[in-house]
Amino acid sequence: MFQTIEADELEKMLKEHFGEKIISVEKLNDVSVAEISVDAIKNVIIWLKENGFTFLTTCNGIHYPDSPKTFGMVYHLHDWKRNLRIRLKTFTHHDPPHFPTITDVWPAANWMEREAYDFFGFHFDGHPHLKRILNEDSMVGWPLRKEYPLEDQARFDKDDKMFGR
């Protein structure tokens, strides 16, 4: 089982170095989560890597269409020596969304960022080879964006009351 750094300790540590670029820090489901301004996320990631969080577990895109924080990237970092994990989030409302690449920090982020591009249309400034990896190059649109209804709107044989809606 992994541990996490306490949220108040993480907040103190990050705000000491990055000030107002740290939007919030909280503990969610036993993991400390920091929301970072998009213009500072790369600097925070580099600083955390230099201070023990040397492993990028994963990074992935998210889409909240009904929120001012429309598009986001989530980064999970691990400190192997202390066995600590943290989660970083950053958001933008611009479409197309732009985030800084971290492929120069962790080369393994290459495929993760390409996946976020392929499924959400996220652009990673400075990425060495941003192109689709799972969908056809000719595909129009971004399949994991929540821009389409979940069910066929032309069907009249279903009553939503039967499904608890």
Image (cartoon, helix red, strand yellow):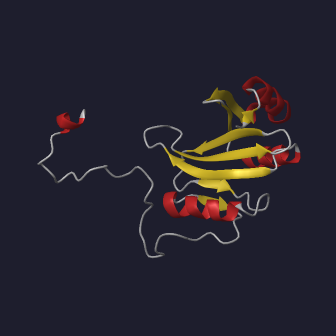
- Residue at image point 74% right, 33% down: 4
Q: Is 25 in front, or is 2?
A: 2
How far across and down, in percent of the image, does residue 114 sit?
60, 64
Q: Is residue 40 visible?
A: no
Q: Is residue 102 visible?
A: yes
Q: Is 108 in front, or is 70?
A: 108
**For this view, does 56 lie left or right of residue 70?**
right
Name the residue at the left extreme: 157
Q: Is residue 136 above or below residue 14?
A: below
- Residue at image point 64% right, 65% down: 111
The quarter of the displayed image where residue 140 is located: bottom left
Q: Quadrant of the N terminus?
A: top right
How far across and down, in percent of the image, does residue 96 sit?
53, 56
How far across and down, in percent of the image, does residue 21 sit?
74, 36
Q: Quadrant of the C terminus?
A: top left
Q: Is residue 139 above or below residue 11?
A: below
How far across and down, in percent of the image, does residue 40 sit?
74, 44
Q: Count the marks: how many?
A: 0
Name the residue at the front extreme: 1
